[in-house]
């Protein structure tokens, strides 16, 4: 049998090792660039948490104004994610990513000109509208390349870029805000928006020339290597069996709404941590922006490791429910401990920070594993629209959680009551996966 025939045959004894080599090549081609894009997107999304440390005093905004502005980003997400994924199916990933990255980078830079709450709300909404579709679009895009058995690790690697952004973003934000404050008449928080928005515009242009929409269009793969991917995806489709492919059935599909509820509960915790970590660190007794940045970076370093290791272990074990539920439950417990310790002067602040790091690691480790669940039940057009639909509705948690925490802090002077509530909601995500997904899988197999 020739090398080409071996590549084309999924049952060949040489196929497993050849498939591994092909997917290493695919991974090194796709994931580094997608990770860079996600780092830039995440920086432009969450740098508001660091800008807040100077911005609120400069513009005389309240904590509630900040919370609403941070969260209103997700209303734009909600409205435009599904149309963006539908457009991706029509025009391809590289055109979609180009449009998205140039848009969000431009809006990020414009935030430097904000002077009123209304301007703040409008630009945060537009930032969400422009970024909408990138995250679910990449999730969909990776399903064009990877079979189910390889996806959790690929998802985990891609999603860990948000943790990498935290590792880089904290010290970078602290350095920019400290060293450039007052330069050319701009505040440090204004320089932060400008210097972190511009690279996204450049990356959007690069995406059009670098990305490949589908395996059969990849000139950097041989014909034999394209066949390996084709057969891996065909084999995967056969093993998964019949799944819903009509997107019009999504809105009455109980499993889809269960997945939305699970992800909503998880994202309540993730968004609360994302937008309030700088404030939590400051309230623990660390005031300098650069110090806050380095402490946040340490938390995200553990979060990145958790996402990659938990995703890889899920792939090896071919198990999803417990790989989601246990990290989510640990994150919820740690968040409750953090709320209890926050502001306790009798205890060393390091205990609060350890609880924060565990909460962040547990919460982030569950995210990539979650995205294995929709593909158990959806295929074709339903998968494309379904991923965006699940993500967009669930991301309304990103609107509610930061805003509620802002209201709670204005009313009580402490984040602790809001953090207790968020911890309880995150624990519900673990419960729903163990109870609900087991029942859904049983009904599917029956």
Image (tube, grey):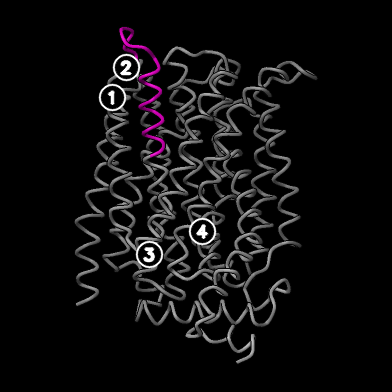
Q: Nearer the viewer, mark 3 or mark 4?
A: 4
Q: Residues within 10 Å of mark 1 (few under 14, many from 20)?
A: some
Q: Are marks 3 and 1 in contact (CB under 8 Å)?
A: no
| Residues drawn in magenta | 342-361
Who is closer to the viewer here, 131 or 156?
A: 156
Q: Secondary structure at mark 3?
A: helix
Q: Find residue 412 and name its label.
A: 2
Q: CA distance from mark 2 to mark 3?
A: 40 Å
Label 3 belongs to which residue?
374
Q: Position of residue 394 (x, y in %)?
A: 38, 51
Residues marked 1 and 4 touching at CB (< 8 Å): no
Tell me the element at label 1. Answer: helix
Q: Are marks 1 and 2 in contact (CB under 8 Å)?
A: yes
List x then y, in percent, for residue 204: 71, 53
The residue pinned by badge 4 equals 154
What label does residue 253 carry, if any?
Answer: none
Tell me the distance, in whole angstroms, between the alpha carbons under discs 1 and 4.
37 Å
Query: Is 307 situated left or right of 225 in this image?
Result: left
Q: Residue 417 shows which numbered tag?
A: 1
- Which mark is in front, 3 or 1? 3
Point out residue 157 in the picture as x, y percentages from the top left corner. 52, 52
Q: Nearer the viewer, mark 2 or mark 3?
A: 3
**Marks 1/2: CA–CA distance:** 8 Å
Q: Nearer the viewer, mark 4 or mark 2?
A: 4
Residue at position x 38%, y 41% from top? 363
Q: Is residue 355 magenta?
A: yes
């Amino acid at each position: 049998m020739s090398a080409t025939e071996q590549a084309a045959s999924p049952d060949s004894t040489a196929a497993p090792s050849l498939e591994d080599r092909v997917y290493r090549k695919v991974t090194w081609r796709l994931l580094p660039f997608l990770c860079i894009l996600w780092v830039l997107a995440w920086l432009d999304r969450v740098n508001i948490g660091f800008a807040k440390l100077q911005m609120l005093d400069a513009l005389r905004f309240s904590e509630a104004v900040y919370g609403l502005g941070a969260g209103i980003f997700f209303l734009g997400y909600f409205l435009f994610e599904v149309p963006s994924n539908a457009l991706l199916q029509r025009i391809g990933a590289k055109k979609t990513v180009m449009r998205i990255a140039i848009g969000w980078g431009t809006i990020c830079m414009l935030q430097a000109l904000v002077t009123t709450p209304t301007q703040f709300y409008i630009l945060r909404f537009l930032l969400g509208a422009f970024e909408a579709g990138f995250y679910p679009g990449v999730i969909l895009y990776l399903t064009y390349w990877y079979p189910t058995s390889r996806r959790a690790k690929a998802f985990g690697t891609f999603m860990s870029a948000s943790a990498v952004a935290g590792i880089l973003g904290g010290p970078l934000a602290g350095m920019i805000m400290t060293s450039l404050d007052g330069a050319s008449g701009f505040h440090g928080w204004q320089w932060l928006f400008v210097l972190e928005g511009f690279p996204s515009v450049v990356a959007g242009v690069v995406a059009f020339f670098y990305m490949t929409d589908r395996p059969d269009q990849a000139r950097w793969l041989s014909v034999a290597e394209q066949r390996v991917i084709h057969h891996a995806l065909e084999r995967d489709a056969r093993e998964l069996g019949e799944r819903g492919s009509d997107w019009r059935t999504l809105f009455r599909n109980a499993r889809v709404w269960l997945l939305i509820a699970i992800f909503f509960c998880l994202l309540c915790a993730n968004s609360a941590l994302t937008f309030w970590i700088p404030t939590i660190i400051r309230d623990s007794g660390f005031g300098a922006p650069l110090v806050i940045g380095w402490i946040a970076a340490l938390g995200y370093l553990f979060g990145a490791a958790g996402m990659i290791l938990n995703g890889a272990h899920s792939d090896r074990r071919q198990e999803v429910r417990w790989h989601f539920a246990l990290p989510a439950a640990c994150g919820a417990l740690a968040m409750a401990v953090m709320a209890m310790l926050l502001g306790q002067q009798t205890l060393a602040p390091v205990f609060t920070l350890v609880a924060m790091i565990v909460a962040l690691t547990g919460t982030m480790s569950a995210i990539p594993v979650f995205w294995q669940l929709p593909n158990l039940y959806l295929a074709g057009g339903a998968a494309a629209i379904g991923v965006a639909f699940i993500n967009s509705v669930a991301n309304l948690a990103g609107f509610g959680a930061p805003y509620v925490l802002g209201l709670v802090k204005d009313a009580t002077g402490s984040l602790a009551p809001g953090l207790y509530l968020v911890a309880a909601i995150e624990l519900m995500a673990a419960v729903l996966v163990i109870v609900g997904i087991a029942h859904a899988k049983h009904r599917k197999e029956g």
